Amino acid sequence: MALGDEALFDGLRAGSEAHFNVLYDRYFARIYSYLALRVRSRADAEELTQEVFTAVFRSASGYGDSSSPLSWIYGIARNTALSYVRRQQAESAKEERMLRGVAVLPASPEWTFTPEERVREERLSAEIERRMGTLAPCQLDAFRLRHLEDLTIEEISRRTQRSADAVRSGLYRAKRMLFDAAEIEGGDE
């Protein structure tokens, strides 16, 4: 299709996957480059780019004509990058506090999990293990390659001889399953 951005968004608002695919192909490299400069990780930039385009597809009906479609997409990318950076900073601060706490606190029998915390952790671990057992071996492999070996979607696709979309789908299912298990366990408090 040789359509302009406005025409692509009109089609996208009508739910056209073909219009979305053209928009995705047209702007993937730009959005990926933008994010890669901000997050400094190819794999994370790739994953965030997928999040951006998922948000574009889901929220296309909210696009107003006050800016160009590309500016609107960049706005989503900027917000996605800011959220990622905030999460990373919060995780780093938490790790740093934990490390400082471990280094400062004496080894003491009083510094242990409460029985309730121990039971909660054991239940969460068992639930995650149970749910991981429901994943297909290819999904487990993709998850391991992505999150333990920090490979990009394309590298995983080549290594597993599966399409990039199949890898993304498997990764999404695995992550969703982990988040759901954590939310269920967190809701018991």
Image (tube, rainbow, N blue to C red):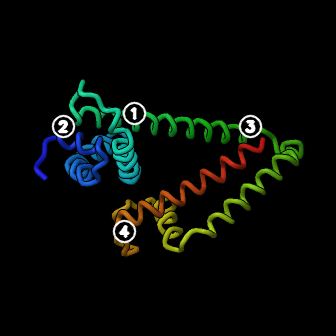
Q: CA distance from mark 1 to mark 2?
A: 22 Å
Q: Which residue is mark 1?
A: 79
Question: Could you tell me how far apart the alpha carbons at marks 3 and 2 are, in whole angstroms?
Answer: 59 Å
What amino acid does circle 1 point to? Asn
Q: Which residue is mark 2?
A: 6
Q: Amino acid at mark 3?
A: Val
Q: Amino acid at mark 2?
A: Glu
Residue at disc 3, secondary structure: helix
Q: Amino acid at mark 4?
A: Ser
Give the alpha-carbon distance from disc 2 to disc 4, as whole Å. Answer: 33 Å
Q: CA distance from mark 4 to mark 1?
A: 28 Å
Q: Quadrant of the C terminus?
A: top right
Is mark 4 in CB contact (under 8 Å) with mark 3? no
Q: Where's residue 15, x and y in %?
A: 31, 47
From the viewer's side, name the closer residue of 80 and 70. 70
Looking at the image, residue 96 sits to the left or right of residue 163; the answer is: right
For the point 84% across and 42% down, the residue is: 111
Q: Quickly name the residue at label 3.
A: 104
Please report contact status of discs 2 and 4: CB closer than 8 Å, yes or no. no
Percent across and percent down for residue 6 are: 18, 37
Q: Which residue is mark 4?
A: 157
Instruction: Tell me if mark 2 has few (under 14), some (14-19) or many (20+) residues whose alpha carbon lies within 10 angstroms of its own.
Output: few
Q: Secondary structure at mark 4?
A: helix
Percent from the top left, x then y, of residue 62?
A: 35, 32
Quadrant in the rendering for residue 82: top left
Tell me if 162 is positioned left or right of 3 in this view.
right
Give residue 51's position: percent from left, percent from top: 40, 46
Which mark is first along the chain, 1 or 4?
1
- Mark nearest the camera among 1 and 2 is 2
Apparent side of residue 31 relative to residue 152 in the rendered image (left or right): left
The tag earlier along the polypeptide, 4 or 3, is 3
